[in-house]
Image (cartoon, rainbow, N blue to C red):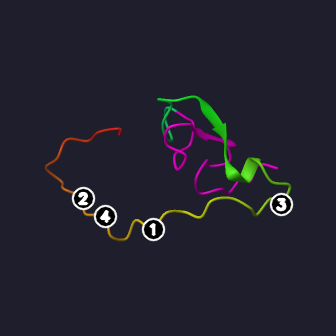
Amino acid sequence: MINPNCPICFGLGFVCENHPDRAWSEELGCQCGAGDPCACNRSPDIDAGIEEPDASHIISDADSKKRRH
């Protein structure tokens, strides 16, 4: 059952095969690989799924070029 509040797939139910922590969507994530079912789409429990990654230690550089990958 797809979780509409999933922090990984944003309710789409699918993630990028190459980047399973990104939604399979050109606008919301990545489509460089085939679509794989998200963890929330592989379980009968609507609250199941991958926990949102901890991004608290990521340092962003405002001068760097924005890249998709």
Ranked by sequence position, the earlier of labels 4 and 3 is 3
Please tell me the numbered disc located at residue 54.
Answer: 1
Q: For marks 4 and 3, give the CA distance.
A: 31 Å
Amino acid of disc 3: Asp
Residue bearing mark 2: 60
Q: For marks 1 and 2, give the CA distance.
A: 14 Å
In the visual, does 14 lie left or right of 67?
right
- What is the crowding at mark 3: few (fewer than 14 residues within 10 Å), some, or many (at least 20)? few
Q: Which of 63 and 55 is in front in this view?
A: 55
Please tell me the numbered disc located at residue 45.
Answer: 3
Judge whether 45 appears above or below 39 on screen: below
In the visual, does 41 lie left or right of 68?
right
- What is the crowding at mark 2: few (fewer than 14 residues within 10 Å), some, or many (at least 20)? few
Ranked by sequence position, the earlier of labels 3 and 2 is 3
In the visual, does 5 lie left or right of 56?
right
Amino acid of disc 2: Ser
Q: For marks 4 and 2, give the CA distance.
A: 6 Å
